[in-house]
Image: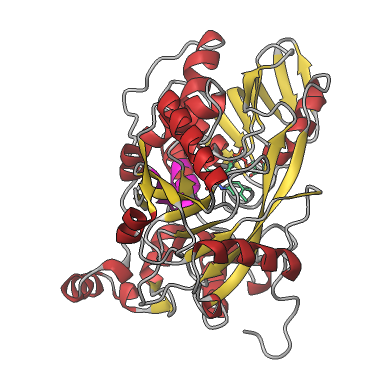
Amino acid sequence: MTYDVAIIGAGIVGCFLARELSQYNLNVIVLEKDNDVGNEASMANSAIVHSGYDPIENTLKAKLNVLGNAMFDKICEELDVKFSRIGSLTLAFNEKEVETLKMLQQRAFNNGVDVEILTYEQIKQIEPFVNENVKAGLYAKTAGIVDPFNLCIHAMENAIDNGVTLILNENINKIIKENDLFILNNKYQSKVVINCAGINADEINNLVNKETFKIISRKGQYYVLNHFKDEFVKHTLFMVPSDKGKGVLISPTTSGNYLIGPSAEETNKFSKSTDLKTLDEVAKQANLMVDKIPYYQTIRTFAGLRATPSTHDFIIQESDTKNFINVAGIESPGLTSSPAIAKMVVEEIISKMLPLTKKENYNPKIKKYIKIKELTLDEKKKMFAIDKDYGTIICKCEQVSLGEIKDCLSRSCPPHSIKALKKRLRVGFGKCQGGMCQAEALSVLAKFYKVDKKDIMYDNLNSYILYSKTKGEN
Ligand SMILES: Cc1cc2nc3c(=O)[nH]c(=O)nc-3n(C[C@H](O)[C@H](O)[C@H](O)COP(=O)(O)OP(=O)(O)OC[C@H]3O[C@@H](n4cnc5c(N)ncnc54)[C@H](O)[C@@H]3O)c2cc1C
């Protein structure tokens, strides 16, 4: 079969591109090297929907950040993804930083973003946890937080529901062009190729073009705090940005946890480990903003890799090879910009390559997910009466039932691994980090896929959890 469009990479950019294209009469295929969608930068980030005061004027970053931010309410409603406009405060600690805030206020104005500078007293009224050494803060009320895992997964679920094909575990390492058609890995033929391969986008580009840009991998390390009952920060708290990026932040997440980070260090494209020295430095920075951060609530640390382009702006254009499009160097604010990036690529670039006619039966919505944890007792009782699996709790920390897992497995972008299940439903995301529920979750997956338990991977292929039986058959 010849596809109209082949998308390389199912991060948030590839997922939104697939969804955007799925409204047209086109054959679209997504080729992803991992065992799940959204498994790289798109799952290991700060999960902030940035307001857009920070990117330099007239860059693609500035334009697409602001356009993307405005799209989130509708998209998250259609895709049943948690999103909340909690607002952000960028805190200045001395007169020089206050001057930088004034420069950022002007930049926000130029970018079309509504912000105001608050005094320490005004900040204290809306965010009592900040330290008294804060001099002023830039308040951006349109900033928000989102569930980045399900943003990718539900966008892809919606794209597949509308006819897109997703192939996992397909590492693209060969592309040739023959008679106006691209042939990828000697298997997939397509008229148009879109390169959304994150930190590998330069290598994918170099398979068909001369080297025109480089992607540098910059690591960001974080602490994740558990959700707890005591009051804590309600806004995303940033430090004043520097040439290294936005700096360390403290932010609530849509699941009630808190993120503290990230660091910023150049690294190779495979290094996702965290280290105490860097995390200590992150804590030192964060402690400037808030005194009493409850680090004893830390349930894990993680790192994500920024795909920093040598060109200093998003690279979104047709390459020297006709019908080969690079969507590369999508570092922060890439999560925020992703829906606007997809719209721009389709409307401004693909429309010149392929005829775009709308499908009559396109549906932008997915079926809503039932979340037992969020139901009232009466609603829970009703659900148990309809299906008793909703009364069997598998993940006790995050209160996820067997019914929810079965529903998730029946969807068009289902989990194949323990980590994929964790990203979708938070099974194993809580205080015990899967210690209590992982074995049960593994059994449910093995039963559903009718495979031996040892064939259920933690994440990518060959990430075995079980190697062989020690006794008996089960
Ligand atoms: C530490 C950190 C913090 C951030 N915080 C924010 C934030 O708060 N707000 C915000 O807006 N943005 C943030 N970002 C940026 C945002 O996460 C990224 O811009 C966005 O996730 C990029 O999406 P992507 O699809 O381009 O890349 P990715 O998510 O990396 O996806 C690329 C995909 O391509 C696949 N791939 C790679 N090579 C191949 C191959 N050869 N064959 C097939 N598939 C391949 C990968 O497996 C992956 O799935 C942050 C990023 C980092 C790292």
Residue under the point 48% across and 42% down: 156
Question: How far across and how far down the image is residue 29, in percent?
Answer: 58, 32
Q: Nearer the viewer, residue 128 or 463?
A: 128
Start and end of the magenta stretch?
Answer: 143-155
Identify whether 420 is placed above or below 306. below
Q: Is residue 185 visible?
A: no
Residue 101 placement, left or right of 313: left
The N terminus, quarter of image: top right
Q: Magenta includes 187?
A: no
The C terminus, quarter of image: bottom right
- Characterize the magenta stretch by its predominant secondary structure: helix
Residue 75 placement, left or right of 394: left
Question: How far across and how far down the image is residue 269, in percent?
Answer: 78, 47
Question: How far across and how far down the image is residue 45, in percent?
Answer: 57, 51
Residue under the point 49% across and 61% down: 133
Q: Quadrant of residue 456?
A: bottom right
Residue furthest left in the image: 378
Q: Is residue 383 visible?
A: yes
Q: Magenta includes 151?
A: yes
Residue 113 placement, left or right of 104: left
Q: Nearer the viewer, residue 346 or 220?
A: 220
| Ligand number 1: quarter of image | top right
Residue under the point 52% across and 59% down: 423
Question: How far across and how far down the image is residue 76, in percent?
Answer: 35, 44
Residue under the point 65% across and 66% down: 458
